[in-house]
Image (tube, rainbow, N blue to C red):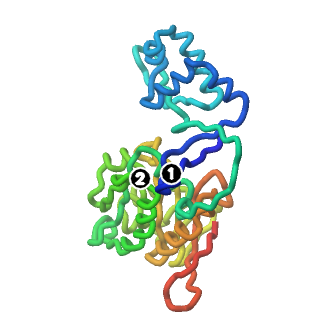
Amino acid sequence: MKKCIILDPSTNKIKGIVSLIDSEKYFKALSHPLRIKILKMLSEQVMYSQQIAEELNISQQLANYHIKVLKETGLVEEAKRVRLRRRMARLIKLSSEGFAILLKTREEHTEAIEKLPRFLVEILGREEKITLVLSNPEPHGRFMCRGKDHYMIIETVFKLGIISNRYDILNVKLDTEVTKEDLSSSNVILLGNPMVNMITYKINDILPIKFSIESGNNIVSTLSGKVYTEEVNGVIELISNPYNENLDLLLIAGKSTCGTIASIIALNRYPNKIADGNRYDNSVIAHVVEGVDLNCDNAIDEVNILE
């Protein structure tokens, strides 16, 4: 099912992310009143099938049948499996915040939504907070480096606030202060390469595009096999949060400070391209960018997306 954003036209803020239903199989699945009740129950919390059966006062077998129909059509999905009383029990959740029937489509330009990549807009539409991890400006970590790029993220943070209707969306922490609880309970945005950001250093080995710290902090892509050595090279990568696989982690970093500038310019100027997959593996959102000084004033004002 195609995901769509529900936007409040009066405030231009996101109300939620819904899935469009557009075929008879969905209508058939939604035609039974018990299945509607199950969806309403799951909108409040994830549940075991046994809980659903007890809540609806029906047999476990009947509850499993209706859950199976909803699961086969993609309206619900398995959240996780838990061992209870020597057997595996499945937690069931909605596959989307809501479902909608769109009878007539139209194209309408909405500037606010285009200010950030689609994946960030979707993250904003969910309930979890976002923890922004900045590198400490004092010498710290294995390399005793200072974070110098805090000001660069301001435009992105501003846009996060513009299209979100939640005042508590963002939790900002230094890499030396952030806790495992912060990282595991929220979506995470990391700013800075492994030499300046201790959290980036800890996850560097699992990134699809890594930093080779022992080789001058060069950028090494496992997707293309290429090595990027220029100071103006940077990365933008979206992966599953290694501290909580149900959440996301976004890394914005450069080989040097000017590489980080290039990454942030790319994120804000070319959101649609950044939301697409890597050209060597389009199932992975991970990009290498190159900063360009067009007017020769020793400042990056344009970027090329290299992969």
Q: Is residue 5 left or right of residue 195?
A: right
Q: Is the Cβ of the residue at disc 2 closer than 8 Å to that at disc 1?
A: yes
* Residue 234, image x, y percentages: 52, 70
Q: Nearer the viewer, residue 293 or 56?
A: 56
User: How far from the left and from the top, in percent, is residue 288?
Assistant: 58, 67
48 sits to left or right of 302: left
Label 2: few (<14), some (14–19) or many (≥20) C-alpha neighbours in 10 Å = some
Give coordinates of residue 153: x percent, y percent.
Answer: 41, 68
Query: Count of labels shown?
Result: 2
Residue at image location 56% in from the left, 55% down from the top? 118
Name the secondary structure under disc 1.
strand
Instruction: State whether residue 48 is above or below residue 199.
Output: above
Q: Mark 2 or mark 1, which is nearer to you?
A: 1
> Could you tell me how far apart the alpha carbons at marks 2 and 1 are, in whole angstroms?
10 Å
Q: Amino acid at mark 2?
A: Asn
Task: Residue at the far front: name it.
Answer: 10
Indicate which disc residue 69 carries. Answer: none
Q: Farthest bottom residue?
A: 296
> Which residue is disc 2 drawn over?
165
Quadrant of the frame with the C terminus: bottom right
Question: Residue at 60% of width from left, 15% of height from top?
Answer: 65
Q: Is residue 221 visible?
A: no
Which three-letter amino acid code belongs to the residue tagged 1? Asp
Find residue 74 and report its image quarter. Answer: top right
